[in-house]
Image (spheres, rainbow, N blue to C red):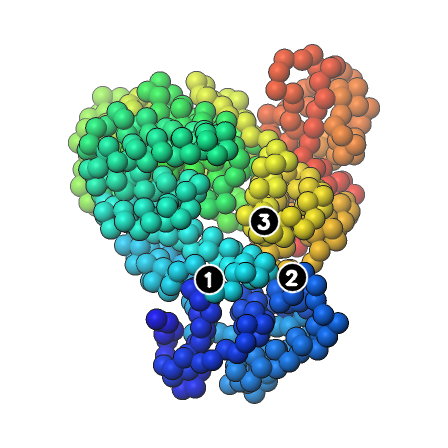
Amino acid sequence: MIRPPARPAPAGTVYFSLLGPLTAVRDGRPLPLGPRKQRLVLATLLARPNTPVPVDVLTDAVWPDDPPRTARKNLQVYVSAARALLGSDSRDGRDRVVHGCGGYRLSIDEGELDTLRFRSLARAGRAAGERGDLRTAARLLREALDLWEGPPLNDLRDSTGVAEEAERLEARCLTVYEDWAETEIELGRAAVAVDGLRDLVERHPLRERLRVAWMNSLHQSGRQAEALAVYDDYRQLLARELGLEPSPAMAALYRAMLGRGRTARPAAAGREAAHGTALPAAPRDFTGRREELRELLALLGSPDERVVVVSGPAGSGKSALALRAAHLLGDGFPDGRFHVQVRREDGSARTPGEVLGELERLCGVRAPGGSGVPAESAVTAASAVTAESTVTAASAVTAASAVAADSAVPADATVPVGPERGPAAAVSQGAADAWQRWLSLHRALIVLDDVPDEAFVRGLLPRSGPSSVVLTARGQLAGLAPVHRIALGALADGEALELLGKLIGPGRLRTDPAAALRIVRACGALPLAVGVGGMRLAVLRHLPLAEYADRLGDPSAALDELVAGDISVRLRMASGWQDLSADDRRALGRLAGPAQEGGFTLDGAMEALGCGERAAIRTVESLIDAGAVTSPAGEVTAHAALYEVPRLLCLYAREREEGRFSPG
């Protein structure tokens, strides 16, 4: 059965479905779609709605092996039939299928195509999840899944071109199913997902995220033996088929289940609750970082490590790693997992008072005194408090008041916890003590994302108790101790190619693997840049990989090419650039030239900077601390070391040095 669009369409509108066999209805009646080759053309156009489809792609879909000499003329006949079926656009009377320089473009609305409706519902569901509205997220994701009638285009998969489009659609459906199942598990409703997950695992036995969700749903339904068997079966399958082991995250989940018996995890509360989850959605395209993820999971699972710093240059995937671990470790932190962005959208740092206010709101910490005055107002009357960080103190925390009294500091005194000194940076002693009291009594995981420096977070870190904090930062925050540090660099070539393939499709990646490798290397194998490049290629379906690789290989144009919608690699580099001191910016601009030639030595740094050995060492080490320069992992003398700067940061530094910087 084909489900109707969410909003009533005008009478006579054709509604197409790709999430199952290719079908169409008009006014509730099925429509004949013609012979097989005509349906292949229609399916290919519908699989790329509102996007030019090159003639070669249509030809390959219909005649994958040996197209006839009349292929183009035949295509025109099939496209003409599609025009007749679709009719003209009701808004301007134009044909729905038009031919341009990029190929044939089919114009269609959300209410006329199930895949567009599916995408819209999935986006709305994920947005609700990121806001912490898990019930709405689960409902919207379920509505999207209800459009799924089986394997997409399952009646036309004998065409290689259509099969690739169908696999891409099915991967999206599976990802949304995983999002929905994980949301239901977070809500404590794991039982509703068990049977569907089992069926999908049978069809996709090597898809690990499905297995993990199935394990979790069985475990939370009190079926621990079956949950453990899912892991054992998967471990044996991987060893037999691929010679691999399950991921560190899945192995950690298995060990955690072994230690918890049959007790199901309680339902998660909403974003405003004291004991709940306030995490953005898990990164869907997380790739690689197996060793780093294993290390982070082990550290956060240990009772001895309370603070972990994940550092690396802009775009290295620090936030993705921290969030991946946070989503996998939910059962280890019964009092909640909370994520707070330390910077605003323009890259400037929020005040420590704003960040503490948000943490206290998320965790349900009440300011002492019971006066009903927002905790943030204690900062000072001269400081304007934003609505997003205001915390209402409806009741007193008497224990925190006692702490303040014991220390002989008035509860309304202000304590600077960040680098700034002044009204906006100060935090009330009562609020700071209440936060530390809460941390000492609860086991929660706090992710503070994109920290500017050590001074900003010192007063926010736990002094005692079982809570853990993950800090992500471009610099290494060398002034914090004792903490454990995980430094991220570029992805390995294979990992970067895997990430690119997830975004543009494995079939397209295989068409020119050499060009794909050039693309990821031109991106410095940084996850952000590879991701932006992949998103751009996913939109520019007509663009050959080799041509895009040539564009990225041009130092003067690479940053211009790494823009996808409102995501710009140059702007991310600009934010990191502003974090550097004036001296470090000047030095990096001078070192960018030799760094582009494959790295630089201490002698090269002395020559570029025009200074002596001691000054060069101090400058290079300052840039290492700031995360702008990478050094060898092992011990090596300063003269023997080869230092590197990420390629894209080099290009940005050269722009600034040469005065070519453009904020666009």
Residue 64 image label: 2
Q: Amino acid at mark 3?
A: Pro
Q: Secondary structure at mark 3?
A: helix
Q: Position of residue 387 (x, y in %)?
A: 36, 52
Give left or right: position of 197 versus 567. left
Q: Position of residue 79 (x, y in %)?
A: 61, 78
Q: Amino acid at mark 2?
A: Pro
Q: Earlier in the sequence, mark 2 or mark 3?
A: 2
Q: Position of residue 16 (x, y in %)?
A: 45, 73
Q: Earlier in the sequence, mark 1 or mark 3?
A: 1
Out of 124 and 458, give the one closest to the viewer: 124
Give left or right: position of 361 versus 456. left
Residue 154 image label: 1
Residue 201 vertical position relative to residue 167 in the rendered view, above or below: above
Q: Residue at x 60, y 52 (%)?
A: 507
Q: Secondary structure at mark 1?
A: loop
Q: Which residue is mark 3?
A: 506
